[in-house]
Amino acid sequence: MDTWKNIRDREFGKLQPNSFSNRIKSNRISQLQLSNHKELVSSHKGAINSLQIDLTEGRYLLSSASDASVAVYDVQRPSDYTGVISKHSCLFVIDKQHQLAHKYAVSSAIWYPIDTGLFITGSYDHYVNVWDTNTTQVVVNFKMPGKVYKTAMSTLSTSHTLIAVGTEDVQVRLCDITSGAFAHTLSGHRDGVMTVEWSASSEWVLITGGCDGAIRFWDIRRAGCYQVLNQSRTQLGRRPPILKRSMLTKESSTKMRASQKKLANGSGSGQLAIGRLSSKGPMKQKLHPGMLSTQDRATAHYGAVTGLKVTEDGMYLLSAGSDSRLRLWDIESGCDTLVNFETVRIQTSRPIQLATTQDSALVFVPCMRVVKAFDMWSGNAHTILRGHYESVNSCWFNQQDQELYTGGNDRQILVWTPARTIADEMGEGDPDDQDSWSN
């Protein structure tokens, strides 16, 4: 009924097109359940470690597994249709029988952001391979000093083609596809780097999470990280909207000028205090956060950082740790927003892949054998998705179709779709109006 109400409001002009679209999508997302009409036929013989839908067409799903295999699926065009369930077999699979395949578990597989002509894999065999999708041949590869945990490429980049790689080594390495060489390394973590994530607002900003519990922000154009998140630095809730924030800033600056004027007209000690403040203020601002020993050793979690996810608007960062905590950070201030997510059980031995909806209202978190969808700002569990027989490692939310894909140790890729569609809500109609062959 809500869908038809939204349609009527849109027809009468009560709803703007964007609002109508967002309401329909939110309604669909809130009703996700294990699909009874769509099935991905997994070709993997090991635990599934990563999933990603291509960023150009939103059609091809790339998956990697612990049996050193990588597969691609077409999630829109089924390979077999039984009348009730559409089955999607892989378009191709690269396994150990392939002469250029990885020798050990493929921990990460990502699409080249510009098109589906290339994809990148990282493996426990210490190699990062760049593959030509059409020929399934390796175009270029990079040898790492240890197991590869995570690879990432910026979706915003127009100036570089760098792959950020997190390994069991303490240094983060940037690999240049164009030159086939390492661009440079980022030093600062004190243990292996389990997850890397590019900013959603700048092509130069990289975020890394390490086994030392630290989350570091890097501007790859300069040496050293410029921010280290500290779990003791907190703020309550989200920042106010831009207009409201500008008003608050204006009010605070007015009060500051008034207090300074009052002190200036007062005693000499007041003027001296102002002088001390003005001299120390710039000094504090000049100090580089990454260079201060106290801030440089700050931790975001009491264990390894196993997952990172930047929200679509680029304003907030979600982090998961082996301390079974999920935290939401304000990227601008670097503070923990104190959202109290319900207790989660998160795998501690390997990275996990978080997913968010387009409006960042929900975050999907692998919690052992289930996937929990949390409300971003209340921290309450919106729904619990049960279907896997073993631990879940990865989630990917398809913004185009409002579908969720999950992969786990049971070697299965499950599809979660909205419980009802508009066609379902319309029903079968009046039996008297149906053709004789409809029965």
Image (cartoon, rainbow, N blue to C red):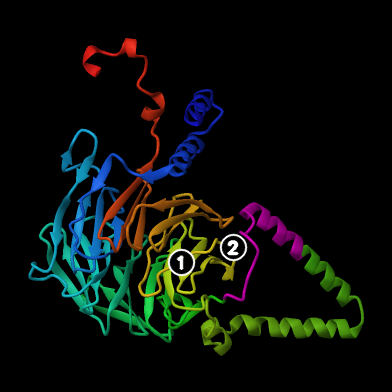
Q: Is residue 130 above or below residue 375?
A: below
In front: 61, or 431? 431
* Quadrant housing residue 111: bottom left
Q: Is residue 117 visible?
A: no
Q: Position of residue 416 (x, y in %)?
A: 35, 47
* Quadrant housing residue 153: bottom left
Q: CA distance from mark 2 to mark 1?
A: 15 Å
Left or right: 100 as drawn, with respect to 437? left
Q: Is residue 270 above or below residue 428?
A: below
Q: Is residue 217 above or below residue 387?
A: below
Residue underneath mark 1: 345
Q: Residue 381 lies in magenta, yes or no? A: no
Give the extent of the magenta segment: 231-253
Left or right: 269 as drawn, with respect to 338? right
Left or right: 266 as drawn, with respect to 150? right
Which class describes the residues within 10 Å of circle 1: few (<14), some (14-19), or many (20+)?
A: some
- Report the amino acid beneath label 2: Asn
- What is the residue that sits farthest to the bottom in this orientation? 293
Residue underneath mark 2: 340
In front: 389, or 351? 389
Q: Position of residue 240 (x, y in %)?
A: 64, 56
